[in-house]
Image (cartoon, rainbow, N blue to C red):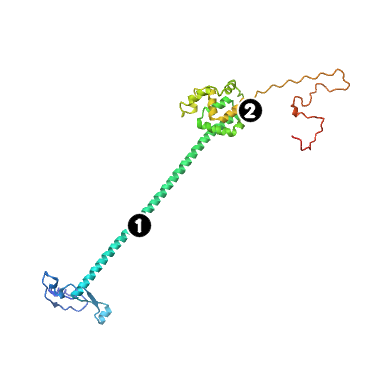
Amino acid sequence: MAQPPLPPPPPNMHHIYPSPYYPYPMPIWLPREAPPYPPQNAQDIPEAFRPATFVHCEGQGNDWDEHRRAKRPRVVRMTDEEAKLEQARLVEIRKQKEADAAILNEERRRIIEEAARHKHEVELKEFEEKRRMMEEARRKHEIELKEFQEKQTEYLMYSKLGRILGLIKAEGLTLDRFLIELITSRDNLQSAWVSKTLNSHGTEIAEALVDRKPKVLEPWMKSKVADMYGSDKKKLVKKLRVDQKKALKAAFVHLQQWQVMDDMHKHAPAIWEVLERLRTLEEPEPEPPAPAPAPAPASTSEPSTSTSEATPNEGAPEELTTNSNEPSNDNDNTSTW
């Protein structure tokens, strides 16, 4: 059966223990006189009713307490001098705690600022690294694009030039068509590239043209190459200076073919070397008539050879004629071949 609850303590009684359910015997109620309220001065409050400044816990001293390891609180009251000293000590402790808290707050603020500064530096380094990588990638892309454009331009130019040179080698292209194909379809930059190519391969081209014997020595070519430094060149230069950005093809539309040659001398000088070599070629001379046979002597005592037989090495240069009467020495190392 449940026990009835204990009655509450009287309100005017001071109880030692906080609860009647404390695991000790029932407390002893001590009747005391209530202090005047509100107190006028601290001295008016009796020392017995002043708030406790120190609580000491000590053992009860019996087997039950030793077994439970419990402590019995005991209020130790101080004198006025001890209270003042204790109050000063508490003030010092409070001040020290406030100073320590300020130091801790300052240290915490410094640590937070250092962490934020370090984070900002790391982010700035990452940003600089990304920007450097993007700049390097952009620079690499520009270089690759420029190389690709140069290679594409060079490929188109050399493919055009190779087709023209292939026509020259295969079909013996005439020089007037060669100039039209090479110059009138190119601008100044491409003409410079053609000049650079012909500087290294111009001799081979000239030899191919000479060996093929194409009909390049036209009458108009002979006359115009002879006076290519004439007054007509000034007119061409004056006309080309009107618009420097205009391609040569647009400027050559209303010009004659001999004017194209004058401008080609400026942009592709190696072609002029080919022209000079072709212009200075002489026409093949006709075969010289066979020399008349020498008249036979009136009286001969020895039989002579037939007059129809030609003299050995007849018509050859004098330095290439060998004397058949001299013995040939094949082992002579000093003889020139």
- Taking the image as shown, residue 151 lies to the left or right of residue 120, namely right
Relative vertical location of residue 53 with respect to residue 113 in this rendering, above or below? below
Residue 73 position, x and y percent, is 22, 76
Residue 283 position, x and y percent, is 65, 23
Which residue has dot 1 on it?
A: 115
Query: Which of the 4 image quarters holds residue 60?
Result: bottom left
Give the CA distance from mark 1 to mark 2.
Answer: 84 Å
- Taking the image as shown, residue 104 lies to the left or right of residue 229, namely left
- Taking the image as shown, residue 153 lies to the left or right of residue 41, namely right
Which element type, helix, strand or loop, lies under badge 1? Answer: helix
Relative vertical location of residue 25 with respect to residue 186 in this rendering, above or below? below
Q: What mark, if any, has residue 210 been given in the picture?
A: 2
Which element type, helix, strand or loop, lies under badge 2? Answer: helix
Residue 331 position, x and y percent, is 79, 38
Residue type indicated by callout 2: Val
Residue 11 position, x and y percent, is 13, 72
Q: Are marks 1 and 2 in contact (CB under 8 Å)?
A: no
Task: Identify the residue at horizontal 46%, vertical 41% (top origin).
Answer: 142
Residue type indicated by callout 1: Ala
Question: What residue occupies the far right of the structure in this picture?
Answer: 301
N-terminal label among 1 and 2: 1
